[in-house]
Image (cartoon, grey):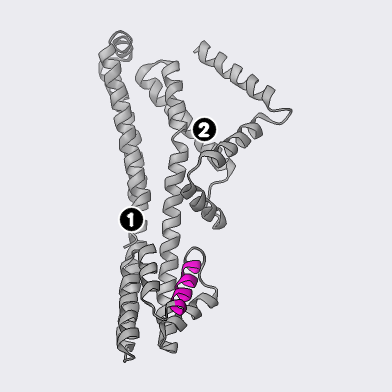
Amino acid sequence: MEFVIIMFVVLFVVLYRQSNGTSVYKFVVDNVETVYEKYAPYSFKVVREKCKEMGLEYNTKQYTTQVVIFAALAFVISYLYFYNALISMIYVVATVSVIPYLAYLRCKRVYSEFVFEQIQVYVTNTIMEFSVTQSFVKALEGVYSSGILEDPVKTDVKIMIDLSYHNGDVGESIDYMNSKYDYYMVRNMHQLFLQITREGARDTTKTLDNMLLDIDELVEGVYRDRIDRKQFHRQFVQYGVLLYLMIMLVQILIKKEVYIELVNSNLVMQIALHIIVLTNSYFLLSGEKYYNENVGAE
């Protein structure tokens, strides 16, 4: 423990001396930002910027709180397993290093939900515009000029309009949009408008009304699924943390002193404990990945 404390003091002094009079906190934050700008994947930067625009990205204080909580939990849990401060510090560093990955997953989920909402707006308003204009391209222009769309969907709709006028046909623009947004409601709407455009005008009022009803039902199901998933995610995290703490039950059954003696004298047991901790961590990370990537849009 004394060694760990000394290492913290040395780290603090080094950071302070390199900070050129600024606070250590600001120095650390600035350096983290520098590393992020240099090494963060382009896709992460894009979704993170969009999250910032929507006001859904964590601020510095929230990230700092997250780091403190993760570090404290990692230290306490690993210490309960090994009763070794040095091993606990290694687990603390490993745990904190996972936070950028969790931030990436969270931003991807928020961005995916935002895109789905934009696609819903695009499809619904294009159908309503078409019922007035009876022209797919004119409907796209009406939706684009209305200002209800945001990037990236807004830019892609503009590309669709340009492609339609350039080719004199909506086929390529529809293929472009389908490839960018592989949603059931997008493909259905595009297929209908492609048939109308190429086969001639006809009475589509009932078909479009039914399509709008289907979209409403789909969106209702998606939002209901999100609520259920959030509740399940909360329970999943609680269950994962409880799995870590099962080691306390073992210590109660065989007594803490006996457990510590076994850990210190038995290499096989130490390896087994590391495997248990890492397996449970992988279980939690896999669950987080599934929760944030499979948003259940359609």
Q: Position of residue 188 (x, y in %)?
A: 30, 74
Viewer-closest of 106 and 20: 20
Q: Please rate how many residues cluster around mark 1, counting C-alpha atoms within 10 Å: few if below 14, some from 14 to 19, many from 20.
A: few
Q: Quadrant of residue 60?
A: top right
Please determine whether, in this image, residue 14 is positioned above or below residue 118: above
Q: Is residue 128 left or right of residue 57?
A: left
Q: Is residue 274 left or right of residue 50?
A: left
Q: Which mark is residue 228?
A: 1
Location of mark 2 (residue) = 68
Q: Main secondary structure of the magenta part?
A: helix
Three-letter amino acid code at the position of disc 2 = Val
Q: Position of residue 77 (x, y in %)?
A: 39, 26
Q: Position of residue 177 (x, y in %)?
A: 39, 68
Q: Which residues are magenta?
A: 154-166
Three-letter amino acid code at the position of disc 1 = Asp
Residue at image location 51% in from the left, 15% down from the top: 4
Q: Secondary structure at mark 1?
A: helix
Q: Secondary structure at mark 2?
A: helix
